[in-house]
Every structure is written in structure tokens, then in C-alpha cells.
Amino acid sequence: MIALREVSKTYRTLWTRREVRAVEQVSLDVAPGEVVGIAGPNGAGKSTLISILLGFLRPTAGVATIGGLPPQEWVEARGVTYVPELMALPRTWRVGEALRRLAVLDGVTDEAMQGDVDRVIARTEIGDHRRKRLKELSKGNSQRLGLAQALVTPREVVVFDEPTHGLDPVWTARFRDVVADLRAPTRAILIASHNLDELERVCDRVAIIDRGRLQRVVEVRGAGALADAAARVYRLRVAAGGAAVASAFPGARESEPGVFDLPALDLPAVNAGVAAAIAGGALVTSLAPRESALEAEFHAAVGLASAPTSGASGGRP
């Protein structure tokens, strides 16, 4: 549904007229029914890509389409559900009023209006704030208003920009349920976020971008998903028996008393080492990857930014 083909965007600075390449030769597809994440450091080009997909910007080179149409034509004809990092609405509007106005803009009929607004207010649990002006809302509640807006009339294309920014841990977790509610065979969902843990939980694939280039696309769900058996760095905590850990895992580093960062190992090696440590007297309290599989891919991809490979185009064959 969403197709980027060798998309580039170049700006010139206002005063010096210096050329800045915000996005360079990015190719990526998002199929109907798919949830795809975009991750990258600040200034990587995520916002520019989103602006191109929303029809706000035209690429300097390459082609961007939604359903075979230029983004602006698609948006004008069929609309896109877009939840920005900051909801830029008049601060004097009240919560219920804001949702009604947004529903009108999305074409909700008068007959369906109240029921739809009531439904999403209940779904995002902002009923206690219904009569508050937007300027009275916390950052987290403003973000929940954005999620409510996305649920009023979800389109065939849904774009989230930093959707969990400002949410408390409870609603960060519930965002996963919102994405699950929005998943549909005919809907493409794109999520730009710095929260790699959430992207790994909700997405099918994650595109990692740095310095305007697509470094790699990581499968996090399905047949090509990140393999748990791949070599990873684990953190092992023990209540006693640190010497046994050091003996079982040559190269392990004790970062603080009873906490060991193990060298990169696959699961069979980790299990064998833990068994040996326990046999030697270690009392293990926890074992977990030091970073998630997606975080490891992200750090590796960003580390390769100075020499991107031609095979990281990201488009589906």
C-alpha cells in the first residue's frame, strides 16, 4: 500500500544555501495488514519521510506512493489517520469538543457522532477530562487524546509519530492494545518511535534509518523474525557464587557486586554456562539480555552508518 522507491529529499539552508540531504535513496514498502516501525537517532530523517508520506513535502528524487497514488492525491481523496508527537489544536477547546470537531473533519455523520466519541473516550479512559480545556491536560493525557482521535475514524493508512512519548508505563503498555485494535487486513500502520522495546512488541518489521539512509529492515515477527538463539550479550545476577560465574563464563565482566555481563553467547552456551555456575555454587536470581534483539540490531546498524551497504534497501522483492 505504501511504497517508497529511491526517495531522496534535499534542502538548502536559509542563509548559507548549503545543501542538506535529509533523506537519501530510501526504498521501503508497507503492505496492507502490516505494522512497520521506523527507528533512528534524532535527525536521522524520520520526520522528513513522514512529511513526504502525508503529502506535506515532495521528494527531490525518487517516487513515493500510497495505493499507487502520490501521497497528496491519496490524502485528499481518502485521508490518512495521523497522530503527531504533539497535538496542535486550539488550547481553549475542551476534550469532548475537540473529538467532535475532529470527527466532523473525518466525515462522521451526526447520527454516529456521539456514540463514536463516547466509545473512544471510554477506550482511552479520558472521561474524567472530557470537559477540560486542552491547555489543562498533562502531556500524557494530551497523547491519549491523540490516540482517541486515531480510533474515531481510522483510515486505511495510519501514521503514528512518537505515540508513547509522555505516556505513563500503564498507557505505554496499553498502546499495544490500541495497535491491536487498529490492525486490519486492509490497513497499513506506520509507527515512528525512539522506543525500541515498544516497536519490537507491536511491529512486524522495523526500518532503521540513520543520516538519511535506510541502514536495514529488521523482521521482528513471523518466519524471518529475530532468532532467540542468536549470539547475544546477557546480564546474570547472583546472590552468591560470583567465582563460579567467572569460572563458567570466561570473559564475563562483573559490573557491580553480583552482576555479571556475559560475553556474546548463543542460548545453548548460555544454558550450559548457567548450569556449570549453579553446580559450582552460584545462586542465580535473574538472567536477561542486556539489550533487546532489536536494540542490538539498531546499535549495529547505526554503527554502520558511515558505510551503508547496498543491500539495505528494505523493499520487498
Image (cartoon, grey):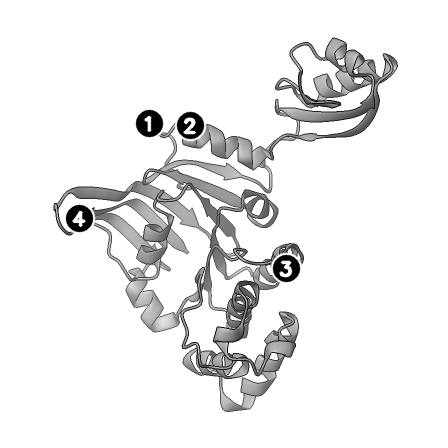
Residue at position x 67%, y 15% in the image? 252
Q: Earlier in the sequence, mark 3 or mark 2?
A: 3
Q: Secondary structure at mark 4?
A: loop
Which residue is under mark 2? Answer: 303
Q: How many marks?
A: 4
Marks 1 and 4, the one that precedes in the sequence: 4
Q: Which mark is residue 13?
A: 4
Q: Which residue is mark 3?
A: 171
Q: Residues within 10 Å of mark 2 (few under 14, many from 20)?
A: few
The secondary element bearing badge 3 is classed as helix
Q: Could you tell whether 66 is left or right of 200 in the image?
A: left
Task: Name which of mark 3 and mark 1 comes first in the sequence.
Answer: 3
Give the spatial CA distance, label 1 vs label 4. Answer: 23 Å
Residue 304 in picture, x, y percent from top left: 39, 27
Report how far apart the C-alphas of labels 3 and 1 lie in the structure. 37 Å
> Which residue shows up at 50% across the image and 90% down it?
110
Does the CB distance between marks 3 and 1 fall below 8 Å?
A: no
Q: Are marks 4 and 2 in contact (CB under 8 Å)?
A: no
Alpha carbons under labels 4 and 3: distance apart: 39 Å
Report crowding for label 3: few under 14, some 14 to 19, many 20 or more residues within 10 A (C-alpha). some
Position above or below: 185 against 110: above
Disc with the residue nearer the chain's start (4 vs 2): 4
User: Looking at the image, is 97 positioned above or below residue 49?
Assistant: below
Does the residue at mark 3 contact the one at mark 2 (Cβ under 8 Å)?
Answer: no
Residue type marked 2: Gly
Amino acid residing under circle 3 = Trp
Q: Nearer the viewer, mark 1 or mark 4?
A: 4
Q: Is residue 112 visible?
A: no
Q: Position of residue 202 (x, y in %)?
A: 59, 50
Q: Which mark is residue 306?
A: 1
Name the spot of residue 68 as percent of width and height, x first. Answer: 33, 58
Residue 312, percent from left and from top: 39, 33
